[in-house]
Image (cartoon, rainbow, N blue to C red):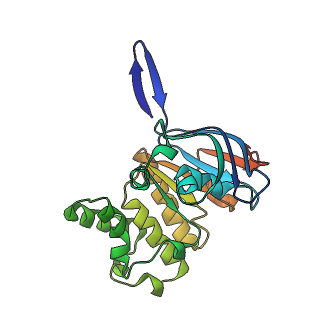
Amino acid sequence: MVQICCGDRTKMINPIEIRNLYFKYRGSPDYILKGVDLTVSKGEILALVGQSGSGKSTLLNIICGIIPHIRKGQIKGEVKLWGEEVKNFKIPDIAKRVGIVFQDPDTQLFSPTVEDEIAFGPENLMVERKVIEERIKKALDIVHLEDYRYENPNNLSGGQKQLVAIAAILAMESDILLLDEALAQLDDQGKERIKETILSLKEEDKTIVLVEHDLENLNIADRVLELRDGKLREYKGW
């Protein structure tokens, strides 16, 4: 949370603030999000649950700017990162602030080696090579894939690919991390490893939003909200 002083008043700025958000995809007669309000605090782990097709992934795509910058539709309301409207950011500016890991890692991995995959984001942000090397080593250490640094991601298992995708996002060192069912393809050991990683990121005041269908993964969340009928509400079932 950031404090901005205005005369004798202090305004608190949160990593994510959403007000009265409506969204529907092109060609769809109905809104999938219908007046969503959400505030996520710095260092908070928020879990989102809900039926398939309820709009959880859509909401994450709006937070990280995929909607409306890449995927189009009709959007109304306010979506802010650190007090600034996401729609006013350019994609590289968003990438410095928020990273997203999708359920299917094959949609994110395209480099010839694990090392190249992790380095890709920082390189595009013109990070110094020495710093990139440090980030690669740190990210691989976190996900325990040091032995696969020079491997082609296509040769890895689904769970290992997901860990590479997570490592690539960690190397960006964004303040906000979005996980869209990113634990779905991991075995129990992999899930525990990533949970430990998420909790360590919380200690660094990172803000994490995770979409989950497995209720056993909600034990690391500070708060769980359910997306139902286009709106968010407190989830009572955990």
The quadrant holding residue 130 is bottom left
Task: Note whether 56 is above or below 114 in the view shown.
Answer: above
Q: Residue at 41% across / 66% down in the picture?
A: 167
Q: In this orientation, which residue lies closer to the viewer: 11 or 25?
A: 25
Q: Residue at 52% across / 53% down in the picture?
A: 64
Tally of numbered tags: 0
Assign the N terminus to one quadrant of the image: top left
Q: In this orientation, which residue lies closer to the viewer: 189 or 43?
A: 43
Q: Residue furthest top?
A: 8
* x then y, percent, for residue 183: 58, 66
* x then y, percent, for residue 76: 65, 42
Instruction: Tell whether 50 sits left or right of 93.
Output: right
Q: Is residue 234 in view from this perspective?
A: no
Q: Is residue 149 in view from this perspective?
A: yes
* x then y, percent, for residue 120: 35, 69
Q: In this orientation, which residue lies closer to the viewer: 129 or 76?
A: 76
Q: Residue furthest bottom?
A: 155
Instruction: Tell whether 155 sits left or right of 180.
Output: left
Q: Residue furthest front?
A: 27
Q: In this orientation, which residue lies closer to the viewer: 225 or 231?
A: 231
The quadrant holding residue 77 is top right
* x then y, percent, for residue 69: 52, 55
Task: Note whether 233 is above or below 70 in the view shown.
Answer: above
Task: Note whether 201 is above or below 213 in the view shown.
Answer: above
